Image (spheres, grey):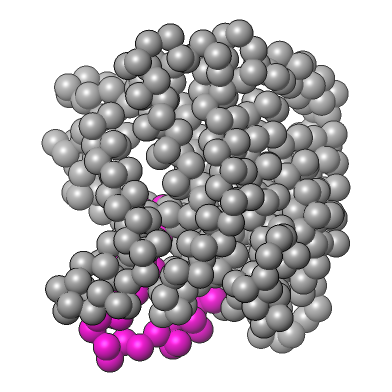
Amino acid sequence: MTAVVGTLITGLFANLPYALAPSIGMQAMFTYTIVFGLGYTWKQALGMVFLVGLVDVIITLTKIRSAIVKAIPDQLKHAIAAGIGLFIAYIGLKNAGFLNFLVDPQNILTLNNKPFTGGGAKVIESITANGSTTPEIATFSQPAVLLGLIGLVVLVLLVVANVPGAFLLSVFITTIIGIPMGVTNTHIDAMASFTSTFKDFGGIFGQALGPDGLWSMFTSPKHILIVVLTVFSMGLSGLFDAIGTFIGTGMTTGIFSEADQKEFYEGKGFKSKMDRGLVADTFATMFAGIFGTSNTTTFIEASAGIKAGGRTGLTSVVVAIGFLLAIIAAPLVNVIPTAATAPILIVVGIMMMNEFKAIEWDDIEIAIPAFFTSAFMAFSYSISYGIAAGFIFFVVIKSVKRKFAEISPILWIVTILFLLNFISLAVN
């Protein structure tokens, strides 16, 4: 329901072709950091999500968010767009199963979010290791990986041949091919899934604002400080995830026209599409806390719809209807294997690589922050961390070169906030 409401707001209010849904990265922080690490209940964690949304709404309505976008240098905007393309392609390669990751047991730091002491676990939920983790290409001996490769070849041929609806057609073809390979799941238990979905939702809805949720966290000064730091960290990440996605996919594809961008930078109120898109994104996070999920984000996977021709809110409305139908017919949606959808992300990522050519690589003062912006998005699996790395290197380099005039006051403030965020993460 969070995805349905958030995407509908984006389509009807902002008239933008973006899909919103709970962030995977924030789900990990919600579970392993806030609940398992800090010891808060899931109801209190949902209260924090609501609080993040409320703070983001205030920041957006006071135009602070738009001021941040204005302060980003043009070269870094190109790096953000290219980095998002690299990130999307990496997600696609990973989802397709093309990459395996080798972990040296001697370098495992945590197992299931607990310090690793050499013992095993009956069920492995997560492993954290240091730089010894090495990616390698898969052997394609597994049917799912082989199907992903077939799907990629099918999609590439359709795109190169300029076949209309290439993305959707490739998903259909790959799903059909996956049936005899045993990858496509044809077992459907619709009633059980439908009943359990609404039963779970009824027990979670509104708990964020209940007596055991938001209001139970402010019992001592120590708890208040931890809540503030956690909300700050979550809010900063969500803030720049949305900004990065809009810059990377909207400004470079013409969704935000020159007139719209001028209105965004110079106008008052919320007449521009980007202004309205940022407002929709923040309200969606507030609803996320109430509905019982982690922070929502404007999904970069929505770029697949943009590349397929989506330019208005009608795209989002259709996606929202699709989300709603997915709730009702979840088993039917689950029939589509990941191997059928992953190739779309790879190809969309490739299409966004042209942003790299707009970066002045001959200028080392630009090349360094641009590289870290793009590379860190994919390698850290986070848009906001990529932006943080680019901002920090940009400010440091310009300061060393004594080019302080090229650093706006807002860029100084945001960079300091990023540094404080990293410090708070280290302390926690």
Q: Is residue 179 visible?
A: no
Instruction: Give the side of residue 135 with respect to residue 196, left or right.
Output: left
Residue 191 lies in quadrant: top right
* Residue drawn where x is 15% and y is 73% of the image: 400
How far from the left and from the top, in percent, is residue 51?
55, 30
* Residue drawn where x is 52% and y is 63% of the image: 67
Instruction: Give the side of residue 367 with respect to residue 322, left or right.
Output: left
* Residue drawn where x is 60% and y is 36% of the image: 54
How far from the left and from the top, in percent, is residue 418?
33, 51
Considering only vertical position in the picture, is 364 above or below 344?
below
Nearest the eye: 7 or 121:
7
Region rendered in magenta = 352-381
Considering only vertical position in the picture, is 328 above or below 387?
above
Q: Is residue 311 visible?
A: yes
Counting the numbered discs, the total is 0
How far from the left and from the top, in percent, is residue 351?
57, 78
How far from the left and from the top, in percent, is residue 169?
78, 67
Instruction: Give the side of residue 130 with respect to residue 250, left or right.
Output: left
Nearest the eye: 187 or 322:
322
Chief secondary structure of the magenta portion: helix
